[in-house]
Image (spheres, helix red, strand yellow):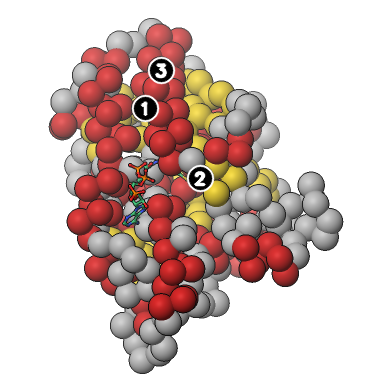
Amino acid sequence: MLRTRILGTGFVTGEHLVKNEALARVMDTSDAWIRERSGIEQRYFVEAGTSTSDLGLGAARKALDDAGLKASEVDYIVFATMTPDHFFPGCGALLQNKLGLGHVPALDIRQQCTGFIYGLQVSDALLRSGQAQTVLLVGAEVHAGFMPWTQWDHLFGRPGPAPTAEEKAWNSKFRDRTVLFGDAAGAVVLRAAEGERGLLGFKVHSDGTGFEALYVPSCGFAQRPYVTAGDLAEGRHIPQMNGKHVFKLAVTRMPQVVREVCAANGVQVRDLDLLIAHQANLRINEAVQRALELPDEKVFNNIQRYGNTTAATIPIALDEARRAGRVKEGQLVCFVGLGAGFHWGAALLRA
Ligand code: ACO
C-alpha cells in the first residue's frame, strides 16, 4: 500500500514573547482571566515587517533540515493560512520564490484552523496519485495585523506611548478574541512510500451555515469598495466571534469526527496512541479528551505557550511531540481541528 509519510517537521514563532500580564498594558484584561478561560499563558507576535511567508520560510527550512532534504527536492508547495501577506496572491508563490524553487506549483489553502488537515488531505492525494513526489506543507499565521492596538512598543516593553484611557477602551472591545491568538508557522515534508506506515485516512467536513459566528465582516468583495475608512473606524476588519457558539461546535464536532475517522479506518478510539487537536482553547481540548475518554498521556497540548496560531497549531504540536519522544514509530496518531467556515476534520497517521 502506498502511503504518505511525514519525513520532517519544524516550526518558528514571531520574534516577541508576550506573556498574559503584558497584554494588560494595552487592554483591560488579566493573566487570571486568560488562563482560566483558555489555558493560554503566553504567545508570540512578530516584529513589524515580518510576514506570514517569512515565518513559513523559517518553518520550511527547519522541516527540510529535519527530513535531510534540500529545498530543490520539493516539487509541490501547499500553504495554509488565513492571514496571507497580501489579499492576493497567496503565500504559496511567495514562499516558493523565497526558497528559490523556480516554477514548482504552489497551492493556497484557506480553511483557517482546519487548514493543516485539509492541506494534509490534498498533499496525500497529490503524492499517492503520483502528481507530486515531495510536498512541502506549511501552516503559518501572522495575526498581529488583526490586533486593534497601535501601542506595540509599549506592549513589547520598549520605550513608546502607553494607550490613553480611550485607546485602552477601544483595545478592550475585542479582548475576548485578541488574547487568544499568536504568530507562528509549522511545516512538514511529505513523501509517499510503500508500507503500513503513513497517513491512513481522513474525514473532513464543511458547513457554511452560520459562518458569521466567526468571520471578518469587511475586507471582502461582498461590499464595495472591499474595505472602507468606516470599516477600520468601527473595527470590521477584526474577526468577529461568538465565542460560546464556537466553543460548543468544537466540543461536539471534534470528538465526532475523531470517532468517524477511526471507524472508517477500522480502529478504535482507545487504540490511539496520541491525539493532537487544534490548539484554540485548552478548555475545548480538555472537553474533547473527556468525550473520547483518553488519558492524559495520549493527548498533546501546547497552547499554554503559543496561543492559537490557527493553521500552524497542529504542525507545531507534532514537531514538539516528536522531539519529546511522544510519537514513536508504529504508533497511531490522530489530528483533529475545527475552525471558521465552519470547517472541521480529522486525519489518522501510523507514525
Ligand atoms: N479579559 C478579561 N475579561 C474578559 C476578556 C478578557 N480577555 N474577554 C471577555 N471578558 C469578559 C467579558 O466581558 C464578560 O464579562 P461580563 O460577564 O461582565 O459581561 C466575561 O469575561 C465572560 O465573557 P465571555 O465572552 O462570555 O466568555 P466565555 O466564557 O465565552 O469565554 C472564550 C470566551 C475564551 C473566547 C471562549 O468562548 C472560547 O474560547 N470560545 C472558542 C473560541 C475559539 O475557539 N475560536 C476559534 C478559533 S479562531 C479560528 O478558527 C480562526
Question: Which residue is painted at 50% across and 55% down in the image?
Answer: 140
Label 2 or label 1, whichever lies nearer to me, is: 2
Mark 3 element type? helix
Indicate the quadrant where residue 270 lies.
Answer: top left
What's the distance in space between the residues labelled 2 and 1, CA to CA?
A: 16 Å
Dot 2 corresponds to which residue? 241
Question: The disc labelled 1 sits on which kind of residue?
Answer: Val
- Where residue 256 is drawn, which disc sits there? 3
- As drawn, 26 above or below 264: below
- Answer few, some or many: residues within 10 Å of disc 3's Cα (few below 14, many 20 plus, some between 14 and 19): some
What's the distance in space between the residues labelled 1 and 3, CA to CA?
A: 9 Å
Counting from the top left corner in percent of width and height, residue 77 is at 61, 48
- As drawn, 100 above or below 68: below
Determine whether the beta carbon of the residue marked 2 sits less than 8 angstroms from the nearest atom of ligand 1. yes
The answer to which of marks 2 and 1 sits earlier in the sequence is 2
Question: The disc labelled 3 sits on which kind of residue?
Answer: Gln
The answer to which of marks 2 and 3 sits earlier in the sequence is 2
- Determine whether, in the image, residue 82 is placed left or right of residue 276: right
Counting from the top left corner in percent of width and height, residue 78 is at 60, 46
Question: The disc labelled 2 sits on which kind of residue?
Answer: Met
